[in-house]
Image (cartoon, helix red, strand yellow):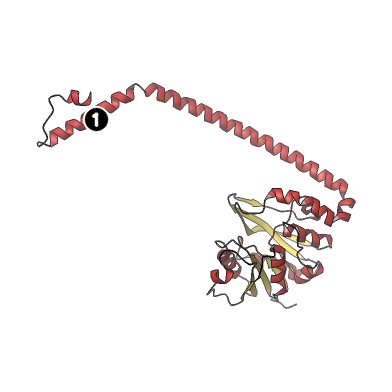
Amino acid sequence: MTNNPLVSIIIPYFDFSDYLLEAVNSAAAQDYAEVEIVVVDDCSPVRPAANILQGHLFPRLKIIRHDKNLGCATARNTGVKNSTGEFILPLDSDDTISPKFLSKTLPLLLKDSELDGVYTQMNIYGELNLIHIPDVTLLNVLTAQPGPPTFIYRRKTWEKVNGYRDGFYHADAAFWASILSAGSKVHRVEEPLFNYRRHKRNGSDEKLLEEVPALSREFRDFFIENLEEILATEEKKYWQLKQEYKVLQSGFRKLEHGYTEANTVLTELIESRKKSIPVRMANFTRNIIRDIFRNDSKVSRPSSIEETVS
C-alpha cells in the first residue's frame, strides 16, 4: 500500500439532475489529492450525466452509462469495477461530503490495518435539519437502524462480500449487514462530515421497516443466535418512541392552548372595535374629500361635505 493511496468516489446517478453537479463538486473539493470520481449513469430518464458534467475540469472524472436501468446496487458495483482506488467511497448523487472527509477518515485506515471502514456523523439538511450520530452495529442494521450510505472502506472489503446485493430497496443496509456479518471492523469519526439531503424523494422509513423480514431471511443465523437481544432492542425502541410521542403530544397541546388563547383575544378585540371601525373610515374619507376641494379650485365644491360622506 502506498503512502498516498488512490480513493475512488463512486456516484450512482438516476434522476437527481438538480443535485448531481453539487455532489461531484464536493468530491472534487477534497483536501486530499489522490482521488478519482466515477459517475455511473443508471440509464437516467432525464438529463444524462455526461451532459450535466460536460466540461468539468476535474482531471480524474469518469462517466459510465448503463443501457438500461439496473438499480443502485448494480450501479455502485459497476462504479467499483471500473475504478482503480485502494479505497472506496460511495456517494449518492443528491448528497455531498465535507472537503475534509478524506483527510479525517483515510489516515485511520492507513494507521490500523485491521480497520475495514470509517464513517462519520451525519449532517442532515433540507426538509429536516439536525446532526445524526449513527451507531453502526450488525444488531442495529438488522433492526432498521442502518449505517450511513456514505463511508470509506477498503476495496478488499467490497470484494470479500461480492459487492452490493441486488433485490434490496435499501442497498446500503444490505451492504452494511454483509460486511459486518463477515467480521468487518468499523470506526466512527465524531464530526458531521457527510451531508445527507432530506427531501421528498428519499427512500422512505416505511420501506426500510418492510425490508427487515428480507434481511432476517438473508442473515438468518445471526437472527436466530441473537433473537433475545433483538427482541430486547425492539422493545427498548418501542418504549423510547412511546415516550417521545408523549413529549410531542404534550408540546402540541401547549401550542394548541396558546393558539386558542391568542385567537380568543383577537376575536374579542375585533368585536370591541367593530362599531368604531365604520366611524373611523368615515372620518378618514371625509378628511380626504376636504383636502381635494381645498387644494383643487377647478373642482366644484359640493354644497355639503357631510352629505357626500353620509
Res. 112 visible in picture? no
Residue 300 pos. (x, y %): 11, 32
Say if residue 253 shows up in the picture. Answer: yes
Position of the C terminus, as image quadrant, is top left
As rendered, which of 200 and 143 lies closer to the eye?
Answer: 200
- Percent position of residue 121, x then y: 67, 56
- Residue sticking out furthest to the front: 68
> How far across and how far down the image is residue 35, in percent?
64, 73
Residue at which label 1 appears: 285
- Front position in the image: 219 or 247: 219
* Depicted 307 relative to depicted 86: above or below: above
Q: Is residue 208 above or below residue 241?
A: below
- Residue at image point 80% right, 55% down: 138
Count of marks overlaid on the render:
1
Asked whether, in this view, residue 221 is left or right of residue 248, the answer is right
Q: Which image quarter: residue 269?
A: top left
Quarter location, residue 253 = top right
Amino acid under disc 1: Thr
Q: Residues within 10 Å of mark 1 (few under 14, many from 20)?
A: few
Place of residue 191 in the rendered image (x, y in percent of width and height, measured from the top left):
65, 58
Quadrant of the rendering where the N terminus is positioned: bottom right
Please, what secondary structure does the residue beneath circle 1 have? Answer: helix
Q: Is residue 67 above or below residue 255?
A: below
Q: Which residue is depicted at the point 70% across and 48% down?
A: 206
In the image, 236 versus 205, the foreground residue is: 205
From this view, report whether residue 196 is shown above or below residue 287. Answer: below
Residue in view at x 33 percent, y 25 percent: 277
